[in-house]
Image (cartoon, rainbow, N blue to C red):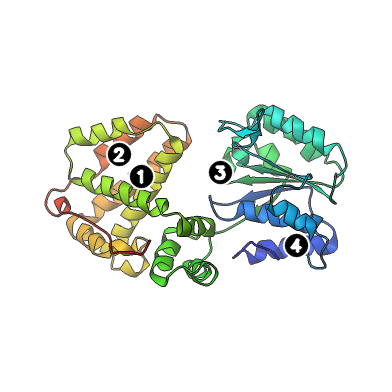
């Protein structure tokens, strides 16, 4: 059984390829973080090694071994891949040595299954040397080998690598679908499921993790509270905030994306489209902000947030990025000094 949800066209493509026996030797799976790229990659790995009648059956020994991460012919390469001592270590790039090991393994026939499957998770992190080394395998693929490249940032990949893979795009699914899965498959109560579905932006993986890990919503509350305080803060307080932020690109992007969703909601509320907002547990607060801020203020800061994400993607100095945001953020004294809290949601 395929575990991938909400991607009917993608599944139809792979099912047809399996039935006809004409799967490509390399696929580029493109989509936002937590959209289900890893789930799809493991689904395909199971399907090409499955011993059941309708692959992937999820019940045969190969399917079970792949699920448990013990299948000898399935290799996952990423920034968190085990190194040396066997302990997972966070790295900044996928190295040429990783790809050379891939090529060495690919030169041998499958050890226990029908196909060797190499999953490169976060392919945008391939170093230039690693990407160029990978080209040899993509151009002259060994028999019974499938390479799956997973990325949320396709533009950071070498065009030569992209051109040698069959591109498969995973798109966000509807909030209704996410909500249904949370309620029916995970037993999440309806109010919480509705909130997580909206916040997920169509990325089911995020919603599933947030449904069992309260830190996701707790972190969101903290970041929004900081933003609420900044709106009423003086310049000195704002610059102190920017100076104290960790030099962490991923954290910075998460914060700015969260702010971007909020300011989009303010704009929608001002335009009488409150029924489409994401932060549904802050409905009254959004109405207050919509009354306090002007449409040009809201629109201009949304533009600033979008520009800051672009700058971060180009490795701009994070402190400078946030200092500019502090200057661009509207400042209001009257209504925003009141305590702001969301509607209660069961955790």
Say if mark 2 contacts mark 3, CB within 8 Å.
no
Find residue 291 and report its horizontal and vertical position in percent: 18, 60
Number of other residues with Cα within 10 Å of mark 3, as a class: few under 14, some 14 to 19, many 20 or more: some
User: Which numbered disc covers residue 153?
Assistant: 3
Task: Report, in whole angstroms, how far the alpha carbon at label 2 lies from the one at label 4.
Answer: 48 Å
How many numbered marks have been drawn onto this rendered protein structure?
Answer: 4
Give the SS element for disc 3: loop
Say if mark 1 contacts mark 2, CB within 8 Å.
yes
Task: Report, in whole angstroms, how far the alpha carbon at label 2 lies from the one at label 3.
Answer: 24 Å
Q: Mark 4 or mark 3, which has the lower sequence index?
A: 4
On-image quarter of the N terminus: bottom right
Q: Is residue 47 above or below residue 71?
A: below
Number of other residues with Cα within 10 Å of mark 1, as a class: few under 14, some 14 to 19, many 20 or more: many
Q: Mark 2 or mark 4, which has the lower sequence index?
A: 4
Task: Report, in whole angstroms, how far the alpha carbon at label 4 lies from the one at label 3.
Answer: 28 Å
Q: Residue at x 78, y 51 (%)?
A: 24
Residue 207 appears left or right of 301: right
Write down the residue under mark 1. 305
Q: Nearer the viewer, residue 117 or 133?
A: 117
Q: Is residue 276 above or below residue 108?
A: below
Give the SS element for disc 4: loop
Find residue 91 and report its horizontal and vertical position in percent: 57, 31
Image-quadrant location for residue 94: top right
User: Which numbered disc covers residue 325?
Assistant: 2
Task: Report, in whole angstroms, how far the alpha carbon at label 1 lies from the one at label 2.
Answer: 7 Å
Give the SS element for disc 2: helix
Find residue 307 and report its horizontal and vertical position in percent: 39, 41
Say if mark 1 contacts mark 3, CB within 8 Å.
no
Q: Nearer the viewer, residue 148 or 28?
A: 148
Task: Report, in whole angstroms, how far the alpha carbon at label 1 lies from the one at label 3.
Answer: 18 Å
């Amino acid at each position: 059984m395929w575990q991938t949800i909400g991607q009917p066209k993608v599944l139809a493509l792979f099912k047809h390829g399996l039935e006809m026996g004409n799967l490509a030797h390399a696929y580029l799976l493109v989509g936002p973080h937590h959209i289900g790229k890893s789930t799809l990659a493991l689904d395909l790995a199971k399907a090409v090694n499955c011993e059941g009648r309708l692959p992937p059956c999820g019940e045969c020994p190969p399917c079970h071994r792949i699920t448990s991460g013990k299948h000898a012919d399935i290799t996952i390469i990423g920034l968190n891949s085990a190194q040396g001592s066997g302990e997972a270590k966070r790295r900044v790039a996928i190295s040429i040595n990783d790809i050379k090991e891939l090529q060495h393994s690919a030169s041998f026939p499958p050890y226990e299954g029908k196909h060797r499957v190499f999953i490169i998770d976060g392919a945008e992190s391939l170093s230039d040397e690693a990407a160029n080394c990978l080209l040899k395998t993509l151009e002259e693929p060994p028999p019974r080998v499938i390479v799956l490249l997973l990325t949320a940032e396709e533009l950071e990949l070498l065009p030569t690598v992209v051109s040698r893979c069959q591109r498969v795009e995973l798109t966000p699914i509807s909030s209704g679908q996410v909500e249904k899965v949370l309620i029916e498959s995970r037993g999440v109560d309806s109010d919480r499921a509705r909130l997580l579905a909206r916040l997920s932006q169509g990325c089911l993986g995020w919603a599933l993790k947030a449904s069992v890990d309260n830190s996701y919503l707790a972190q969101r509350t903290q970041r929004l509270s900081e933003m609420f305080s900044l709106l009423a803060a003086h310049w000195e307080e704002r610059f102190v905030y920017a100076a104290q932020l960790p030099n962490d690109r991923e954290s910075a992007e998460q914060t700015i994306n969260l702010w971007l969703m909020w300011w989009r909601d303010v704009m929608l509320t001002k335009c009488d489209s409150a029924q489409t907002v994401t932060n549904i547990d802050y409905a009254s607060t959004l109405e207050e902000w919509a009354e306090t801020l002007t449409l040009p203020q809201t629109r201009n800061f949304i533009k600033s947030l979008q520009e800051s994400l672009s700058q971060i993607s180009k490795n701009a100095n994070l402190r400078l990025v946030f200092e500019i945001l502090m200057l661009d953020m509207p400042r209001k004294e009257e209504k925003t000094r009141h305590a702001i809290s969301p509607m209660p949601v069961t955790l």
